[in-house]
Image (cartoon, grey):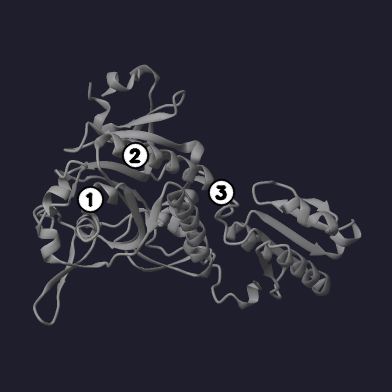
Amino acid sequence: MKQSQLFTKTQKFAPKDEVSKNAQLLIRAGFVHKEMAGVYGFLPLGWRVMNNIMQIIREEMNDIGGQELKLTALQSKEVWSKTNRWSDEIVDNWFKSELKNGTKVGLAFTHEEAITGLMKSFVASYKDLPFSAYQFQTKFRNESRAKSGIMRGREFIMKDLYSFSRTQEEHDIFYGKAKDAYVRIFDRLGIGEETYLTFASGGTFSKYSHEFQTVCDAGEDIIYVDKEKGIAVNEEVYNDEVLADLELDKNNLVKEKAAEAGNIFSLGTKFSDAFDLTYRDENEQEQKVIMGSYGLGPARAMGIITELLADENGLVWPENVAPFKVHLINIGEDEKTEEIYSQLQDAGVEVLWDDRDMRPGAKFADADLIGCPYRVVVSSRSLEAGGVELKKRTDKDGQIVNVDKLIEQIK
């Protein structure tokens, strides 16, 4: 893509009312637009990143057998009344409204009830199980105070997967597969080394649930990390005698601020009880379906990547999620740059070509702010030296690379 055709522009300063690092940088670089507190729209560069993140998640969910669907955000009162979660006393962050005919509706903050009700139409026999289904869906939560930029909003996209199993053993097997898939996702997103499987309260479903917490200064949680074992415990269970079960020594745990990147829950039969979601087993006996819920927010992941990896000059994107792999900059030499631009595109390399008529310093500053993994500079100086200047975003200095070897080095 030619940068001159990109309608967004970079900004020197972030909005004065924006305090979070991730939103400040993403707004300045032209990735997101702040509609209001806790509500952000994604501009072309930001939406490319979001799609890359969602594709990684999609591939891993498909790999463990997840089937993608899309439920409605608009939900009826009757469905949610079955679990009492329509009540403001139980859930205080609903966005609710009313249709012209008087029917009460809400904008879903999650989808356990909706998908459980849906599955009554498809589950009858043990032969129908097990399976899992997931979606990328916009959620709405009427947070009293939205903060942390795109990491916590009133409107946000969530990947939520739900599993349906015949027995606890069958559920546990899938639960383990989902846990492993999450580890792979965070590795592919470039934050795996700082993301820990974290034991948290399991509520009424089990002794523990599992969160994936990424150590970063912008985090809202406190966790205690055993770096040797690569696991952590949330502060809420730190003082629990949970720790003997987990074979963790309090002397080895390091206190850290962390941001929740994802979570997985065993739901038992809470929702299948409420909706009478049953199946007939091999002996024609009615049994309740065992369920699980597995959440991961792509925008939250995008915010965590920003918080964790950005430097003093701007964004730093891992190759798997970057909006473009290469930021191509020409200083004069339009004809040669266009030739290189075409070669990169023909080789399947996604390129943002800064073809604007601007001074070099401004182009370099924008390239650092936008944060593509590689910067390629074409100038008379580089050509005289034998090629183009190739520089990784995370390196201090670049190197001259022969044009014929450029694609090989990048790929």
- Dot 2: few (<14), some (14–19), or many (≥20) neighbours within 10 Å? many
Label 2 or label 3, whichever comes before in sequence order: 2
Query: Label 3 amino acid?
Result: Asp
Mark closest to the chain's N terminus, 3 or 1:
1
Please, which residue is most extreme toward the bottom here?
Answer: 100
Q: Do tag 2 and tag 3 residues touch (Cβ < 8 Å)?
A: no
Drawn side of residue 60 relative to residue 366, left or right: left
| 215 left or right, relative to 369 | left
Q: Nearer the viewer, residue 193 or 293?
A: 293
User: What's the amino acid at mark 2?
Assistant: Tyr
Instruction: Residue 168: give x, y in percent of width and height.
Output: 25, 36
Q: Secondary structure at mark 2?
A: helix
> What label does residue 175 carry, if any?
2
The image quadrant of residue 137 is: bottom left
Please give the name of the residue rendered at 23% of the width and 54% of the height, measured from the top-left corner.
123
> Alpha-carbon distance for marks 2 and 3?
36 Å
Image x and y of residue 172, in percent: 31, 36
> Label 1 belongs to which residue?
125
What residue would you read off at disc 3?
Answer: 311
Instruction: Give the residue at x 58% y 59%.
Output: 369
Q: Amino acid at mark 1?
A: Ser
The one nearer the camera, 199 or 151, is 199
